[in-house]
Amino acid sequence: MSELQAVLFDMDGTLVETESLWQEAEVLTMAAYGSTWSDEEQHFALGGPFGRVVEYMAQKAHADPTDVAVTLVDAIDQLMSSRPLPIQPGIAELLAEARAAGLATGLVTNSFRRLISIVLKSTGLQFDVTVAGDELPENKPHPMPYEFACRSLGVDPVATVVLEDSMTGIASATAAGCFVVAIPHMAVIDAAPRQLIVPSAKDVSLGLLRELLAQ
């Protein structure tokens, strides 16, 4: 039994609908090297980590991974800067409820800091801490991103709820000791201990999160 201390959010797919933009960026990147990117490969890429995806793309395209990484980040940066970034249903309301209640909040993503900045500027959402994938030695599915967020906020992972939409992110949050609310937009997510699967963040409230941690 724990009293809720913090609510943490994944970014791509969970906070905002950007997975379609990532797929478009990956298609553009592979085309730049004379190769292709399929829907099946997009599912493989869902949630990252970025390095794994880039290594796969580079191997398939017979290109240098560093060059591929630069091309991909430039492509997604341009797309995210020029397209609407819809906030996923229920996210803004849950974040506002958490902040109004005095709970710690955080954004934890494998994406780069420059992409976090684009999302925050576009949505106007605010968090107590933001964790970027290019600022830590380990990314999801390693627990480090969520462990780092909890340490930065001064909260206990056991008393922290994480909203995630990919198996990569869920593995990270679970390994860090957090309770996970899984919102499977694209991934197939199986039931697991200390995890709740919901269709949308509209189905989540602070009252529900407190009840889950109190069990």
Image: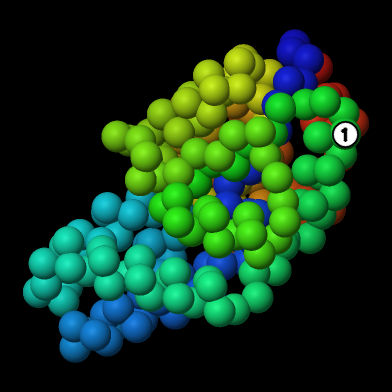
Q: Is residue 23 visible?
A: no
The amino acid marked with disc number 1 is Ala
Callout count: 1
Q: Residue at x 78, y 43 (%)?
A: 95
Task: Give the quarter of the figure containing the N terminus.
Answer: top right
Element under disc 1: helix
Q: Residue at x 85, y 49 (%)?
A: 93
Q: In the rendering, at what x and y percent does residue 174 appear? A: 53, 30
Residue 93, placed above or below residue 3 = below
Q: In the rendering, at what x and y percent does residue 14 appear? A: 63, 54
Q: In the rendering, at what x and y percent does residue 120 appear? A: 63, 55
Residue 214, placed above or below residue 76 = above
Q: Quadrant of residue 134?
A: top left
Give the residue furthest to the top: 1
Residue 151, placed above or below residue 105 = above
Task: Give the quarter of the figure containing the C terminus.
Answer: top right
Residue identified by numbered label 1: 100
Q: Is residue 29 visible?
A: yes
Q: Residue at x 38, y 62 (%)?
A: 45
Q: Quadrant of residue 212?
A: top right
Q: Is residue 63 left or right of residue 46?
A: left
Q: In the rendering, at what x and y percent does residue 112 appear? A: 41, 52
Q: Quadrant of residue 103?
A: top right
Which one is in front, 194 or 208?
A: 208
Which one is in front, 214 or 55?
A: 55
Q: Residue at x 22, y 69 (%)?
A: 68
Residue 164, placed above or below residue 119 = above
Q: Residues within 10 Å of mark 1 (few under 14, many from 20)?
A: few
Q: Is residue 52 left or right of residue 81?
A: left
